[in-house]
Amino acid sequence: LVDRERRLVRGHQAAGRASAQLETVELPLDNGASAVARVATIGLPLLVDDVEASPTPLHLATVRALDVRAFVAVPLRVKDRIFGVLTVASSEPKRFAAGDLELMSAVANHVALAVDRAESFQMIEELTRGLEDKVRVRTEQLRAANEELQAAYRDLQATQVQLIQREKLASVGQLVAGVAHELNNPIGFVYSNVGTLDDFVKRLRAILDVYRAVPLADAEQARVDEHWKQLKLDYALKYIDSMIEGIREGAERARKIVRDLRVFARTGADVWQAVDLHEELESSLTLVNHLLKERVTVHRAFGPLPSVECVRSQIDQVFLNLLANAAHAITGPGVITIETRVEDGCAVVAVGDTGAGIKPDVIGRIFDPFFTTKPVGEGTGLGLSISYEIVKKHGGEIRAESPPGGGATLTVRLPLTRRPS
Ligand SMILES: Nc1ncnc2c1ncn2[C@@H]1O[C@H](COP(=O)(O)OP(=O)(O)OP(=O)(O)O)[C@@H](O)[C@H]1O
Ligand SMILES: [Mg+2]
């Protein structure tokens, strides 16, 4: 067979005498001294009657070593490529005639055809294998690209939700701040007048007592008593104080709501200072203690936290809202876990509870102003929207998580140094 890489013809398959020896023969391809190499390069069949008296040059050392006197050599050709030489040799001279050469050529053609088919088959196999590999690699690439796209899509969706949230809060916030401003004065009248009213009622009650102590003639007394009864003054005097107290409480609550709402209006008069958030958490816990009592255990998982530059009163408000919500969410006995840590230049405060959790269909709305699941009169639905606004003003973010098993965690991130949004 022709070995083009090594530029030689080498024995491949032999039968008969000296076959083992023949299979190890190697003859240089380019060297004109070998008859077989010439057949392999030129492609013409060759008949040598007697190697000892040959007109064509031969590799005498090889033929003698193999005990060859006469031989026929025909090229094995597939299309235009000679891939080998078919040789029949004899130890006697003049053993072959022209007919043998023809027969050999015919055999060589069949061999070549068979080799061609085998090669094509192998090639197809190799191509198929290569194709399969390519398909596999391409499929893998497509899968990776698809995953990347899906991740990008999810990110985009999250960003969109956040943007909508911001837009919505910004516009509703402006409206709310305007309404709060308008309500501020009337609530102020009620609040300040109710104190005076209380004072005046006390004075009237005093003079009434004075009048009633004055002794009257029976007929006059009966007339006064009659009027007293008709006007249901016992009833009025019994309830007037608690009614005034009710007005005061209502006005106070309204005043607080309006004050809270004013965080939506950007006044810019806030005092920024370095604050120890652990201290603020402790004081907020004291304020919500009446909601916790013996029922709720507070677990403090405080990590090292440097002071944070913020508006203290506003951050207190955020903590109060989160703690109050957590306490409200826990109906029976339960645990509130407060975790603090530093992450990526931000202070992180996470308030988790063992309550019922936030349902997936409402979790997207809990930061909306006035969104509440609490009964009328119990929740205004402002706690979280105000907290959101405050945290945003501080250049931070607030997130809610509620795993399917129950419980909720509200996480606040605040930049350590002032970075107003
Ligand atoms: N920790 C929590 N666990 C379960 N649900 C919560 C939690 N925190 C908030 N929520 C839900 O989010 C809603 C909105 O909370 P937000 O604090 O804004 O208003 P609120 O607590 O209802 O009223 P308030 O204005 O008195 O705070 C709540 O009504 C509740 O449904
Ligand atoms: Mg709340």
Image (spheres, rainbow, N blue to C red):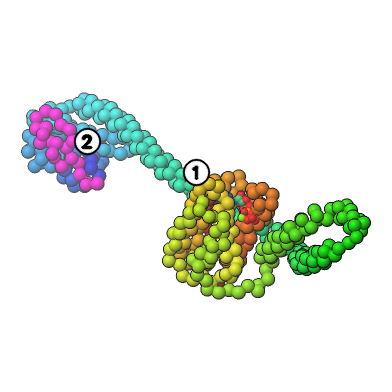
Three-letter amino acid code at disc 1? Gly
With 211 as the anchor, is 56 left or right in this view? left
Q: Can residue 153 be seen in this view?
A: no
Q: Is the magenta stretch mostly helix, strand or loop?
A: loop
Q: Residues within 10 Å of mark 1 (few under 14, many from 20)?
A: few
Q: In this view, does 266 lie to the left or right of 112?
A: right
Residue 191 colored in magenta in the image: no
Q: Are marks 1 and 2 in contact (CB under 8 Å)?
A: no
Residue 335 horizontal side relative to residue 261, left or right: left
Which amino acid, by three-letter code, is at mark 2? Val
**Residue 43 picture quarter:** top left
Task: Decide which of tag 1 and tag 2 comes sooner along the chain.
Answer: 2
The location of residue 298, given as percent across then percent down, is 48, 56
Counting from the top left corner in percent of width and height, residue 167 is at 66, 58
Q: Does the magenta stretch include residue 8?
A: yes
Magenta stretch, residue numbers: 5-26
Q: Name the residue under label 1.
A: 405
Q: Is mark 1 on a helix, strand or loop?
A: loop
Q: Residue placed at 15% from the left, 42% from the top?
A: 26
Q: Quadrant of the C terminus?
A: bottom right
Question: Where residue 101 sits in the image (x, y, percent)?
Answer: 21, 28
Q: x, y percentage for residue 327?
A: 55, 53
Secondary-structure class at tag 2: strand
Image quadrant of ligand 2 equals bottom right
Q: Name the residue under label 2.
A: 85
The alpha-carbon separation of the residues under discs 1 and 2 comes to 81 Å
CA neighbours of label 2 inside 10 A, class few (<14), some (14 to 19), many (20+): many
At horizontal 67% and vertical 68% (from top left) the residue drawn is 266
